[in-house]
Image: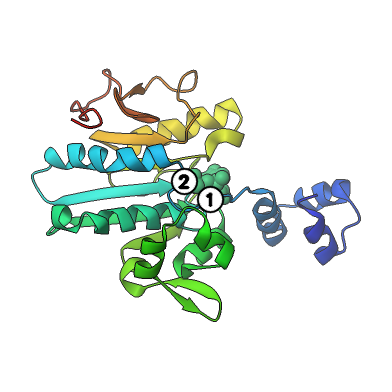
Amino acid sequence: MAVNPILKAHGIPDCDALAAELADPEARTLSDETVEALLNNETYFFRDHDAFSDLPRVLEAIAANRRGKTLRIWSAGCSTGQEIYSIAMQLRDNEAQWRGWSIDLLGTDVSQSAIDRARRADFSQFEIQRGLATGHMLRWFENVDGRWQAREKLRNMARFRRHNVLETPPPGRFDLILCRNVMLYFPGTNRARALANLAGALAPDGALMLGAGETVLGYSDRFEILPGVRSLYRLAAAEPRQILRVAAAGS
Ligand SMILES: C[S@@+](CC[C@H](N)C(=O)[O-])C[C@H]1O[C@@H](n2cnc3c(N)ncnc32)[C@H](O)[C@@H]1O
């Protein structure tokens, strides 16, 4: 059981006793530890090949509408950082295209330990092998005592902070929001709440990317499917928006 280490560490006999302790509003640390234990932080580099092969076209379409050379990308529920570092590496793969651009990469997660790890950006042998091509690994990571540390140049491209997607979003509007494999476990009311928050944080011609198999349907009418790209949404016609169009693959 996920909470067993918490029970053991605090000398709590069982789940009923844990629930009783959590009812105490002063039990802040215990409550944080319990939430941490229950979260599923599963992630890996370039998770979902299709999504990552679509991303350059999506960013290109968004950038085409920008007068200033700035882009803001938010990974909401970024876990230990693999998603945001994958985007950073992909941007650097297309360095010539993004020269002169200022690109803000923000990763947030409700788990403080995930955020601490994302900031440290050091990965085990198992983690580094998941989804990362050898070329990317050698270019962007160095082996330090058997673990793989992201080079400073990559680390400096991203910033991380703790944030709950059910609460007021970080300030400003984002051109691309990724919230992938986060809402899977939410009850419907929380999905609706999270999607309302994400809609409010999206630039008028921005895009929202969910995980493969996730949908807004039935939870929000503030988005519509962006034709031609999997798992991607733009603001719906009723919203103050500029229409974002993404070229079909291969065109
Ligand atoms: C399964 S991981 C997905 C990570 C990454 N987005 C991916 O697709 O690989 C889900 C992440 O969502 C985070 N999470 C769960 N509930 C959250 C919430 N209310 N606000 C922010 N993050 C949350 C978890 O801590 C976990 O790190």
The extreme left residue here reads: 67
- Which of the two marks, 1 or 2, is nearer to us in this view? 2
| Residue type, numbered disc 1 | Thr
Q: Secondary structure at mark 1?
A: loop
Crowding near the residue tagged with mark 1, few <14, some 14–19, many ≥20 C-alpha atoms within 10 Å: some
Residue 116 percent location from the top left of the image:
52, 66
Q: Which residue is mark 2?
A: 47
* Disc number placed over residue 158 in the picture, else none: none
Determine contact: label 1, label 2, CB under 8 Å: yes
Crowding near the residue tagged with mark 2, few <14, some 14–19, many ≥20 C-alpha atoms within 10 Å: some
Q: Is mark 2 within 8 Å of ligand 1?
A: yes
- In the displayed structure, does residue 80 sit left or right of residue 13? left
- Mark 1–mark 2 Cα distance, whole angstroms, equals 7 Å
The extreme right residue here reads: 13
**Residue in the image at 68% along x and 61% along y:** 29
- In the displayed structure, does residue 159 sit left or right of residue 121? left
Q: Is residue 233 at least partly visible in the picture?
A: yes
Vertical relation: 97 (above or below) 215? below
Q: 34 or 179: nearer the eye? A: 179
Q: 90 or 81: nearer the eye? A: 90
Q: Secondary structure at mark 2?
A: loop
Q: Is residue 164 at least partly visible in the picture?
A: no
Residue 240 percent location from the top left of the image:
22, 26
Q: Is mark 1 within 8 Å of ligand 1?
A: yes
The extreme front residue here reads: 134
Q: Which residue is mark 1?
A: 43
**Residue in the image at 29% along x and 25% along y:** 228
